[in-house]
Amino acid sequence: MSELFVAVFARGRTAEAVSDAAWIEAMLRAEAASAHAAAWLRESLENLNIHPEAMERNLREAE
């Protein structure tokens, strides 16, 4: 368990829920969800013939 939460969550299922392993698992799940959303967005934009790289390039040239 993270030392930050020891005094508050030191017992039972709550301790398990805030253990280091639980935090890492939650962060990995969030990262996977973010990657999935980014892939979906890229595919959706490509299907609409919108290219993020070209948009970024155009924005940089306009500055």
Image (spheres, rainbow, N blue to C red):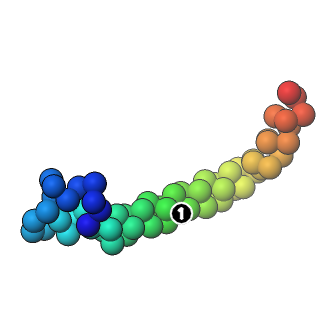
Q: In the rendered picture of this protein, how many numbered marks are placed on residues? A: 1
Tell me residue 40's x, y (percent): 58, 59
Q: Is residue 11 visible?
A: yes
Q: Quadrant of residue 39?
A: bottom right
The image position of residue 22, as x and y in percent, is 31, 68
Residue at position x 32%, y 68% in the image: 20
Asked if residue 30 lies left or right of residue 20, the reply is right
Q: At x 83% / y 46%, what residue is drawn?
A: 54
Q: Is residue 11 above or below residue 38?
A: below
Task: Indicate left or right for 14 with 47 as reference.
Answer: left
Foreground: 35 or 47? Answer: 35
- Horizontal placement of 29 versus 50: left or right? left
Q: Residue at x 59, y 56 (%)?
A: 38
Instruction: Identify the image quadrant of residue 60.
Output: top right
Closer-to-camera residue (33/6): 6
Crowding near pointer 1: few (<14 within 10 Å), some, many (20+)? few
Task: Tell me if residue 11 comes above or below residue 56 in the rendering.
Answer: below
Q: Check the image and name the residue furthest to the right.
A: 61
- Quadrant where the C terminus sits is top right
What residue is disc 1 on? 36
Furthest residue to the top? Answer: 63
Counting from the top left corner in percent of width and height, residue 42 is at 66, 56
Classify mark 1: helix, strand or loop: helix
Outermost residue to the bottom: 21
Provide residue 29's location: percent of width, then percent of height. 42, 66
Does 10 sit above or below residue 63? below
